[in-house]
Image: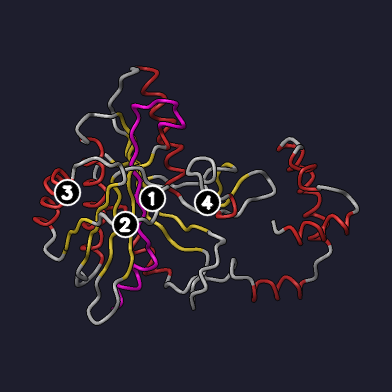
Amino acid sequence: MADSLLQRIEDELGVPDPVGLLSRLSLTDLTSLLLEVYRQKADQRTPAQVLEEYQQSRFVRPAKVHPVRMLEWEKTVLSSLPSEVEPLVLSPVAPLGTCSVVAAVDQNWSVSTVRGNEVVSDATNVLALEACIRRKTLLKENPKSSEVVHLATSQRMLRPQFYNQPGQIPHFNLFCMVSAGRDQGNSTFEHQALLLHLRTMLQALRRHWTELHPLKLTVSDFSGKTRALLTEERIFQPLLQEFSALECQHDPDRTHARNYYTGLCFHLYALPDGADQVFLADGGEVKWSQTLLSNSKERMLISGLGGDRVVRLAQL
């Protein structure tokens, strides 16, 4: 919160450090307090004010994408999942801190609720929690379990960041996958999971688009390991054999999300004829399961593919 805004609130309330005072409350007590505050604020509103906010608030306006086209895409991508991947229907809310604590991003990247939750802003974080619960069960049965948990979902995300782009709205569809397992040595888990995620996405795109747009895959490695040749052998070669419209490149100079991903990571772009490249998907290795399960042997790879952009490209 800006210092000037905080000072104005302090002056109006006549209470020093109101944020510090409230943050010392238990989450249960804070929830009860905020519920009453918002009940009273709602009682003060008029129908005209509600209508005006619906018209003006960027958070609540409908998406531009056609709902039937979106349903068709979701059906295609979920039916493209291999048998080892379990699709889930997630709640629209997650525990407070699901993104800021697990992924170490600012809490303001999510819309927090007065009930101590947050609206899902990235379903990979929620899938990661579910995957860790399942891995925890497996590890209780066998402390060295190497069984991999693969989960997926397709859901609308809500993110409050302002992108300053015409037509950009804070909610959008994201197809997400998470794979969680144990270190198998020689980057075996990482490459197998990455290939599974990419193959699933590419197969879904090929099935959904009447004519497959050319695609570009760029792979980077933030781990410092020397495994470019392994990546070519295990990722590039199999995908190039299956998808003739795909171009594969190493991107050693990438800096984006360096503090988010810890090893192998990728970007996937569409290259529509006569237009600029369109960013579709990204993903990579994260240490979330190591942190959540306090186990350095745990491994996790996540990915997300933007459904709204896929649907719009299908109409080109």
Q: Where is mark 3, residue-wise?
A: 235
Q: Point out residue 225 in the picture as x, y percentages from the top left corner.
A: 24, 40
Q: Neighbour class for label 1 at 10 Å: few (<14), some, many (≥20)?
A: some
| Mark in the foreground, 3 or 4 | 3
**Residue range highlighted in magenta:** 290-316
* Dot 4 and dot 2 residues touching (CB under 8 Å): no
Q: To which residue does mark 1 refer?
A: 258
Q: Residues within 10 Å of mark 4 (few under 14, many from 20)?
A: many
Label 2: how many Cα within 10 Å (few below 14, some 14–19, many 20+): some
Label 4 or label 2, whichever lies nearer to me, is: 2
| Label 3 to label 1: alpha-carbon separation | 21 Å
Mark pair 2, 1: CA separation: 8 Å
* Up/down of 294 relative to 180, above or below: above
Q: As displayed, is residue 40 above or below residue 65?
A: above
Q: Are marks 2 and 1 in contact (CB under 8 Å)?
A: yes
Q: CA distance from mark 4 to mark 2?
A: 27 Å
Q: Who comes first in sequence, dot 2 or dot 3? A: 3
